[in-house]
Image: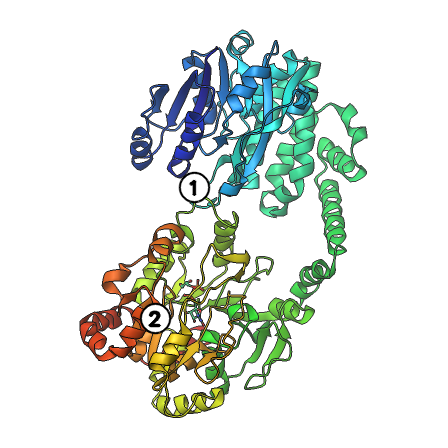
């Protein structure tokens, strides 16, 4: 059996390297050598990888400073002692039988490739499959390497040495191409396994730690064009190599030209770079191109900027128009971009939205009500999913994602939202975005979440782009300000005024308000109210945004024990899709999940039961008792999210495990109040003390001067 050297370049990838190495250790082919090159990682990442070097088959090389992936791979080739070499990236994984299959089928060929699968979440990993003979295909090596990647290829070491296969170290990216050329020109056909052997991880934090492919289109294009030009000159005389390179160039051009030139700042630079590249391309290839590509390339070749700009514009317009015809939504977005965004901006228009158009609530509502009560000179627009929503004042109500919605988002100067806005809304010059957000964080958020996998791999990137548009972010307490800076990477103006949504909790006539609200809901007179308001669970959903909730409170028992004195108000999180079943509980349990504003429910309740929801930070403003029904604490804290604060020791109430515990606690409320009084005071001081009933006023005065 022959030895295989697996070459792994590593640079600050500690979140991923353990999975990667484990997939190598799990190979059923064991005659391996693992050449691991730590290419200038920082201290933390270096310490971490060095703690993992337990397998005797590892050869560890350390570059004090970063030299790039090409350099690491060259070092790997020099160091490797196996008969075969295989390149693996430190964030990727191998299938268990990858190396065995590739070695088994390489036969007399210098190299063999496997299939690559994108890895978004653990369920993408498949159990190993047996290989029927049929699944090996002989393919032209130019087409095997048309993506320009050397990953997932097993190569013979003597071939590498004989052909002097090396990676060019001039650039950061596109460095595989120089290494691929010897393979392309010295092999006609090459076997490719029709089975996945390699998992390419799709990483979800392109902001803090981008991978090479996650750099900007402009950065990547600079590298690619430099590599293409250098090699096209070097291999001018080699028909084979040259046609491979030209094909890569044309593919690159077709796929990326519009995104590269979208940013007109770079027009001059990229016009120059592309025209000198087209200069080198074999002109015979032009005739095979689509007509618009052909004309762009011709203008590039002649160096005619104006004509190129026109052709490209036409190309982009045509593409946009074609996209617009795909459906109603696409058409609305098209009209938004091409027509509405060109209308003049209205300096006194404000668009309000709360919880994705689900209700009339939260800080946007208080800000709006302040504006109408004080007759400030603004035209207000509210976004709802239900276009027949009635609200106080004479705001214009628009249905979310309707044509009117796009119109008002395009022309209104001010946007007030308590969640993220859709990515396709364009912030214009002069727009002012007030992000109110919707709670003090207990559970970790965005960039503080250490998720190697996520339900949506674009989550962090999207969040980053969306939050760049926020001019003001409201903060309810100093602690939240710090979290928002780190979790959102927010660096604009933080309004440290407390939450407008909590003003009502300090209202001088809150008792009377509470009576009115109780009556409107139909809560029997003389009964006390227990509010149960839990949060959602990241891992329990029908589809993203539609979450399940399993009610673990024993309502039957609660009624038996507490029914004389109390009723229960049930309030599910806005992500919960399930409709609670409270049949037979009429008069005792009230399902208020669809009730507009939870602040009203705080006002009418005597006790709050929650779990990891931010509701308790707001409720504590009332200084009324809080119980935590945390039946899944370990899972939630350790697997799903992680917490910012030491909940068990800082929370203003007891953590309870069962329905019985909850009933007991309610029966012994006086004791609990005593036991937790010091903690409650400390908690209030830390999280509530900015509130005094005047937050809305402070916010309006700052933003709507
Ligand atoms: N909410 C509600 N009813 C619930 C839970 C929440 O009306 N049963 C409202 C409250 O206003 C709460 C807000 O939704 O403050 C946010 O809910 P969380 O349960 O805290 O969860 P999430 O939406 O994930 O936001 O920084 C805070 C975090 O972002 C949490």
Q: For residue 357, which quarter of the picture?
A: bottom right
What secondary structure is marked by label 2? helix
Which residue is pictured at 41% across the width and 68% down the height? 534
**On residue 209, which mark appears?**
1
Quadrant where the image shows the C terminus:
bottom left
Give the residue drawn at x 46%, y 85%: 587
Return the x and y of residue 161 as percentages of the image width and height.
Answer: 51, 9
Q: Position of residue 312 (x, y in %)?
A: 72, 44
**Percent of width and height locating residue 228:** 61, 25
Quadrant containing ligand 1: bottom left
**In terms of image quadrants, where is residue 291?**
top right
Dots 2, 1 in contact, CB < 8 A? no
Residue shown at 32% from the left, 68% from the top: 628
- How far apart marks 2 and 1 lie (CA) works out to 34 Å
Indicate the position of residue 543 as horizontal and vertical percent values: 56, 57
* Residue under numbered circle 2: 616
- Compared across the picture, whether 327 is left or right of 31 comes to right
Which of the two labelled residues, at mark 2 and mark 1, occupies the earlier sequence position?
A: 1
> Could you say whether the residue bearing mark 1 is in a helix, strand or loop?
loop
* On screen, residue 156 above or below 427: above
Q: Is residue 496 visible?
A: no
């Amino acid at each position: 059996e022959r030895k295989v050297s697996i070459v792994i370049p590593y640079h600050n990838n500690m979140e991923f390297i353990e999975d990667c190495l484990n997939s190598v250790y799990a190979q059923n082919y064991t005659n391996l050598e693992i050449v691991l090159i730590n290419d200038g990682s920082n201290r933390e990442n270096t310490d971490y990888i060095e703690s993992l070097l337990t397998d005797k088959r590892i050869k560890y090389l350390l570059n004090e400073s970063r030299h790039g992936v090409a350099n690491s791979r060259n070092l790997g080739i020099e160091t490797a002692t196996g008969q075969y070499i295989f390149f693996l990236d430190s964030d990727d994984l191998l299938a268990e039988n990858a190396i065995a299959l590739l070695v088994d089928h390489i036969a007399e060929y210098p190299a063999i490739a496997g299939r690559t699968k994108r890895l978004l979440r653990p369920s993408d990993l498949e159990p190993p499959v047996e290989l029927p003979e049929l699944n090996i295909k002989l393919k032209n090596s130019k087409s095997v390497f048309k993506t320009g990647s050397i990953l997932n290829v097993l190569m013979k070491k003597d071939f590498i040495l004989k052909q002097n296969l090396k990676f060019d170290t001039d650039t950061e990216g596109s460095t595989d191409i120089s290494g691929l050329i010897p393979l392309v020109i010295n092999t006609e056909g090459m076997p490719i396994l029709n089975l996945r052997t390699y998992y390419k991880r799709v990483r979800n934090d392109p902001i803090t730690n981008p991978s090479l492919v996650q750099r900007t289109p402009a950065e990547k294009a600079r590298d690619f064009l430099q590599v293409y030009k250098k090699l096209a000159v070097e291999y001018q005389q080699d028909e084979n190599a040259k046609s491979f390179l030209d094909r890569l160039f044309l593919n690159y051009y077709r796929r990326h030209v519009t995104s590269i030139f979208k940013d007109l700042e770079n027009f001059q630079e990229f016009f120059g770079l592309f025209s000198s590249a087209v200069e080198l391309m074999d002109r015979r290839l032009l005739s095979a191109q689509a007509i618009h590509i052909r004309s762009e390339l011709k203008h590039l070749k002649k160096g005619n900027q104006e004509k190129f700009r026109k052709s490209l514009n036409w190309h982009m317009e045509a593409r946009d128009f074609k996209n617009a015809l795909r459906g109603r939504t696409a058409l609305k977005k098209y009209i938004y971009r091409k027509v509405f965004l060109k209308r003049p901006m209205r300096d006194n228009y404000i668009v309000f939205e709360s919880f994705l158009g689900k209700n009339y609530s939260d800080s946007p509502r208080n800000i709006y009500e302040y504006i109408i009560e004080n007759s400030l000179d603004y035209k207000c627009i509210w976004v709802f999913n239900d276009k027949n929503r009635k609200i106080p004042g004479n705001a214009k109500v628009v249905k979310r994602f309707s044509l009117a919605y796009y119109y008002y988002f395009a022309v209104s100067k001010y946007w007030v939202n308590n969640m993220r806005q859709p990515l396709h809304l364009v912030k214009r010059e002069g727009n002012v975005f007030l992000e109110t957000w919707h709670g003090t964080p207990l559970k970790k958020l965005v960039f503080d979440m250490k998720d190697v996998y996520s339900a949506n791999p674009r989550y962090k990137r999207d969040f980053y782009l969306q939050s760049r548009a926020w001019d003001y972010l409201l903060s309810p307490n100093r602690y939240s300000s710090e979290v928002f800076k780190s979790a959102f990477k927010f660096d604009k103006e933080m309004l440290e005024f407390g939450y407008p949504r909590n003003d009502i909790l300090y209202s001088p006539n809150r008792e009377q308000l509470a009576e009115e609200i109780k009556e409107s809901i139909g809560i029997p007179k003389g009964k006390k109210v227990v509010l149960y308001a839990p949060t959602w669970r990241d891992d329990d959903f029908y589809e993203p945004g539609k979450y399940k909730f399993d009610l673990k409170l024993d309502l039957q028992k609660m009624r038996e024990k507490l029914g004389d004195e109390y009723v229960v108000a049930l309030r599910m999180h806005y992500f919960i899709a399930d409709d609670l079943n409270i049949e037979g509980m009429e008069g005792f349990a009230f399902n208020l999940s669809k009730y507009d504003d939870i602040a009203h429910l705080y006002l009418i309740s005597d006790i709050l039961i929650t779990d990891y929801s931010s509701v308790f930070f707001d409720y504590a403003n009332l200084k009324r008792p809080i119980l935590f029904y945390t039946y899944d604490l370990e899972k939630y804290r350790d697997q799903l999210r992680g917490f910012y604060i030491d909940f068990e020791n800082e929370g203003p109430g007891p953590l309870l495990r069962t329905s019985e515990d909850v009933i007991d606690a309610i029966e012994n409320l006086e004791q609990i109040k005593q036991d937790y009084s010091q903690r409650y005071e400390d908690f209030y001081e830390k999280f509530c003390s900015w509130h005094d009933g005047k937050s809305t006023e402070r916010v309006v005065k700052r933003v709507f001067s």
